[in-house]
Amino acid sequence: MDSWVLWFLFLLSVVQYPQPMGDVLDEVTRLRMELRAKFQEQERIQLEQEVKQLVLMQSGASWRDLPKSALQHWQVWAFAGLLVLLLAVWFMWRKRSCEAEISGKEEKEKEEEEEDETWAYDLRWLLEERIQWPVQDLQTGCNRTMALIENFISVLRRALSRTFYPVLQQAIGIGSAFEGWTAREEEVVYQVLVPLTPPLGHVFHLERDTDQQKAGRNFRVRVELECRCPREYQGMNMLCFQHHPDVIRRMTQQPNLLDTLCTGSYLDVKKTVRWFCTLVGASWRRLPQSRSWHLALLPSKRSCNLRLTNSQESFQVKVLFGVRRHTSDIFISSRRRGAHTPSTMWPESYAVAETKFFRYMAWQVPQDSSHLKCLQLLARVLACKDFSIHSIKTIVMHLLHTVPVSQWHRRHFLLQLSDALEQLHLSLEEKHLEHFIVGNQRLPEEIRLPPDVQRAKPPNLFHGLAQDPAAHSQAMQAYLDLRHRLARVLAYGHC
């Protein structure tokens, strides 16, 4: 009910129950009050009738408005139902669209997986069946080689313990076989480096060769007798090798190193190689390998070359000698450099550092990496041709050092070949290929370089091409031949 109706009934209640008057009023007043009461009673009756009519009018209006209100409520519910229906249809369409999209993605992924599997199968067929790889088990050969050389060194150390010959240290495997690849299809040559340290009473001094006409960094090993006078070694009561060489020679009946393996004051490579080969031949029967292998010493002036054969197989071992520079992975070695290498010259060797780099990268690249296959294929096609295998190896090492390791999966094998060939072509055009070890300040911490090697300017391995235009033209033609031979290998499995 409206507020004004409530207010009006409240007023009526007040008017209907007037307060009684006291007896003190006089008659006139009483009569006046009676008249007033009758007048108010009439007004009250009239007002009640008006109120009843007003209430009846409002009730009639409410019933007349009822169909209209009901109609409005029906329209609202109909609209709400239609909205719910539309939402249900939209959700069903969205669900089907999502299912179709997911199904499409799954089909696409499945197709991509099938393509990857097909590509992987084709590439595996190319790498494992089409191309004829060397069949040697390099890891077995490396283990067998190291066991052989360690047995030799163990026997020779005991035999040389009371002499003044160089002390043989633990051998280090170097070269392609110990790096995990080989270019040879026939007998593999396993290379090891045997470090030499001075015997008691002797000192090695490494002197850099300043002759700029010779390629690379070369050294000589100057041998000095060590002074062990009493004032230098208090309480040791030792004779001095430097001041009493004749006395020591007479007492020990052993010549010093200057009298045996040196030319003048410098350690001689050829004399050292002959000395070691003689010891190997004399001690072979003491080794357990002698019961199942036949040993042959191959002629060589700057290394000790061994060939071991039995009824089923054969392998070669090339033993080089070196002196370590400080505590680094750089040695000066007996390896030949150039056609005429003086017998007292020991070229600086980076083979140990390079082998350590390949072992380090083996832990970084994916398990199915084909970087060694890439290097092996290029080296095999290149064998006995116009480029040195070390140039190709240097390019691959640069790529391993710069290309993200994730890009060395086997499925990227052809891309790796393309990158190596492109880098070779660019280096030939520019007549410039930097050495990988010398001057490289971003090598892993595991590879230790002397400060002068680390700070040196990297030598240009293609320096000769810049000096000889004819050689450069021949090298560019050789590059084209290399591409053609490589295409034949990929197409037919052989050159």
Image (tube, helix red, strand yellow):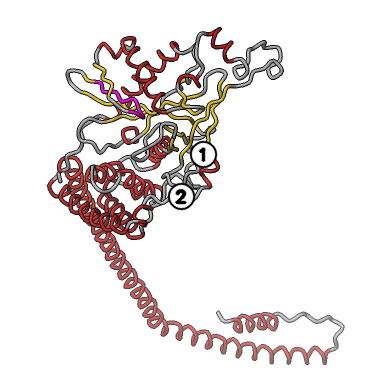
Left or right: residue 472 compared with residue 493 = right
Q: Position of residue 247 (x, y in %)?
A: 59, 10
Q: Amino acid at mark 2?
A: Pro
**Count of number-bearing discs:** 2
- Using a 10 Å C-alpha cutoff, classify the residue at mark 2 as few (fewer than 14 neighbours), some (14 to 19) or many (20 or more): some
Q: Nearer the viewer, residue 428 or 250?
A: 250
Position of residue 494 in the picture relative to residue 277 (left or right): left
Q: Residue furthest right?
A: 24
435, above or below 78, in the image: above
Corner quadrant of residue 76: bottom left
| Residue closer to the observer: 263 or 378 | 263
Residue at numbered disc 1? 208
Q: Which residues are magenta?
A: 301-308
Helix, strand or loop at mark 1: strand
As rendered, which of 375 and 248 lies closer to the eye? Answer: 248
Residue 304 to residue 108: above or below: above
Label 2 sits on residue: 458
Where, by quadrant of the figure, is residue 152 drawn?
A: top left
Q: Is residue 307 covered in magenta?
A: yes
Q: Position of residue 435 (x, y in %)?
A: 41, 48
Residue 98, how many percent across, how many down?
A: 29, 61
Q: Is residue 15 above or below residue 373?
A: below
Comparing labels 2 and 1, the label whose residue is closer to the camera: 1
- The residues bearing labels 2 and 1 have C-alpha atoms spaced at a distance of 17 Å
- Residue type indicated by callout 1: Arg
Residue visible at 52% across and 19% down? Answer: 199
State yes or no: discs 2 and 1 in contact (Cβ < 8 Å).
no
Image quarter of residue 431: bottom left
Magenta segment main secondary structure: strand
Q: Going from the N terminus, do you reach mark 2 or mark 1 first?
A: 1
